C-alpha cells in the first residue's frame, strides 16, 4: 500500500485513468451518421370501446398521444368503455384490465386505466359509473388522477356526452404526465430518447436508434472536466521539473544542508529542520581530551558555543584564535623581546592599499 501512497505513483495512476477514460468514451461514442429517431414496434391499441360511444377521431387521438407519451416516459393510458362489468366491482375490473394488457412500462410501472361502465349502478344510486386506477409506480399520485377524472368527466358523463368527457379527461391526464416528466407530448411527436421501455408480453416496447445530441450543459461540463484534467497533468509535470532543478542545484552529494528551502506540491519532500545543539549537549558530545583542557584552563570558553553556531570577530575580539593571558600571568620572555625588536620589512605578507603606480 505504501507504493501507491507515493506522489509519483499517484500522478502516473491519475494520468492513466484520464487516458483510459478518453479511450473508453471514444469507444462508446454513438454513431453520429444516422438520423436520430425512436421507433415503437408492436401493437399498441389504447382504446377499447365496447359500447360504441366514442368517435374515430377521439380514438385516433388517444392512440397517437399514447405513442408520444410511451416513447418518452414509458407511461400508458388505457381507455375502456363497457356496458357493464358483469357484477364485478368496477375498481377490481379496471385493475384486471391493467394487469392483462400490461399497461405502463415494466421499468416504471406507470400505467393508468380509465374505465366507464354505462349500465352499472354507482354508489350514489345513479345509472352509470366510472373509475381510474394507476400502477404501483404512481400509487402516491392516485388522488391526482381521481380528482382530474371527477372534474373533467362528471358533467359530460351525466349528460350522456361520453365522447367529449373521455377526450377532456384523457387530455388532462396527458398534461399531468407532461408536467411530471418534463416532456412535450403531442400527436406524431416521437423524439430521440436514450431509454428503452417494454410493456406487456412483447406488445408494447420502444427501440432507440441513432445519436441523441447531448445538452449544452453536459457539453460545457465535459469540456471543463477535460481542461481540468489536462491542467492537473501539466501542473504535475511542471512541478516535477521544478523539483529536478532544485535537486541539481542544492541536493548534490557533498553540498550539505541546502540554503534554500523547498516547498513540495506533488514531487519531493521538505528538508527536516536541523536543531542547533545546546551547550550541555555540545559539552557532552565533545571529545574527552577537549573537556580536560577546558577544566584545566588551557582553553577558554568563548561566548556563542564551541565550533558550530559560534560568533566570529576580528583579531583581538571575542572568538579570536590568539591566546590572551589571564590576570596575574606573565608573558613569556621570548614574546617580550620579540615585541621590543624592530620589525623587519621584507616580502612577508602585510597590508595593501590601492593606488596608482
Image (spheres, helix red, strand yellow):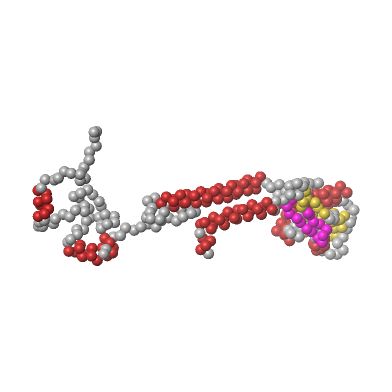
The image position of residue 155, as x and y in percent, is 81, 50
At horizontal 86% and vertical 62% (from top left) the residue drawn is 85
At horizontal 28% and vertical 64% (from top left) the residue drawn is 285
Q: Is residue 13 left or right of residue 306?
A: right
Residue span colored magenta: 191-207
Extreme top residue here?
356
At horizontal 69% and vertical 47% (from top left) the residue drawn is 214
Foreground residue among 155 and 299: 299
Residue 322 in view of the camera: yes
The image position of residue 13, as x and y in percent, is 57, 57
The reply to whether the magenta stretch includes residue 33 is no
Could you tell me which quadrant the C terminus lies in?
top left
Residue 127 is drawn in which quadrant? bottom right
The image position of residue 5, as x and y in percent, is 51, 60
The image position of residue 250, as x and y in percent, is 41, 51
At horizontal 44% and vertical 52% (from top left) the residue drawn is 247
The reply to whether the magenta stretch includes residue 198 is yes
Is residue 353 shown above or below 245? above
Amino acid at each position: 500500500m505504501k507504493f501507491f501512497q507515493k506522489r509519483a505513483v499517484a500522478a502516473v495512476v491519475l494520468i492513466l485513468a484520464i487516458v483510459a477514460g478518453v479511450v473508453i468514451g471514444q469507444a462508446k461514442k454513438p454513431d453520429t451518421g444516422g438520423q436520430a429517431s425512436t421507433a415503437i414496434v408492436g401493437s399498441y391499441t389504447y382504446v377499447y370501446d365496447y359500447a360504441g360511444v366514442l368517435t374515430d377521431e377521439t380514438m385516433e387521438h388517444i392512440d397517437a398521444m399514447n405513442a408520444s407519451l410511451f416513447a418518452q416516459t414509458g407511461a400508458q393510458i388505457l381507455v375502456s368503455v363497457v356496458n357493464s362489468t358483469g357484477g364485478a366491482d368496477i375498481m377490481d375490473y379496471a385493475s384486471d384490465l391493467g394487469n392483462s394488457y400490461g399497461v405502463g412500462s415494466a421499468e416504471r410501472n406507470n400505467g393508468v386505466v380509465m374505465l366507464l361502465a354505462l349500465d352499472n349502478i354507482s354508489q350514489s344510486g345513479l345509472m352509470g359509473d366510472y373509475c381510474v386506477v394507476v400502477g404501483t409506480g404512481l400509487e402516491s399520485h392516485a388522488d391526482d388522477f381521481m380528482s382530474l377524472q371527477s372534474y373533467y368527466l362528471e358533467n359530460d358523463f351525466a349528460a350522456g356526452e361520453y365522447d367529449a368527457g373521455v377526450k377532456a379527461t384523457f387530455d388532462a391526464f396527458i398534461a399531468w404526465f407532461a408536467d411530471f416528466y418534463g416532456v412535450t407530448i403531442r400527436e406524431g411527436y416521437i423524439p430521440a430518447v436514450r431509454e428503452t421501455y417494454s410493456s406487456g408480453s412483447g406488445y408494447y416496447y420502444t427501440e432507440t436508434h441513432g445519436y441523441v445530441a447531448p445538452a449544452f450543459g453536459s457539453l460545457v461540463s465535459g469540456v471543463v472536466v477535460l481542461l481540468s484534467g489536462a491542467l492537473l497533468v501539466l501542473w504535475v509535470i511542471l512541478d516535477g521539473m521544478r523539483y529536478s532543478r532544485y535537486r541539481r542545484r542544492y541536493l548534490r552529494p557533498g553540498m550539505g544542508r541546502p540554503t534554500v528551502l523547498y516547498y513540495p506540491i506533488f514531487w519531493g519532500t521538505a528538508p527536516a529542520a536541523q536543531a542547533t545543539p545546546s551547550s550541555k549537549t555540545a559539552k557532552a558530545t565533545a571529545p574527552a581530551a577537549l573537556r580536560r583542557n577546558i577544566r584545566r584552563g588551557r582553553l577558554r570558553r568563548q561566548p556563542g558555543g564551541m565550533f558550530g553556531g559560534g560568533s566570529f570577530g576580528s583579531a583581538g575580539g571575542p572568538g579570536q584564535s590568539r591566546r590572551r593571558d589571564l590576570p596575574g600571568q606573565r608573558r613569556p620572555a621570548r614574546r617580550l623581546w620579540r615585541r621590543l625588536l624592530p620589525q623587519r620589512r621584507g616580502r612577508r605578507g602585510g597590508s595593501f592599499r590601492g593606488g596608482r603606480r
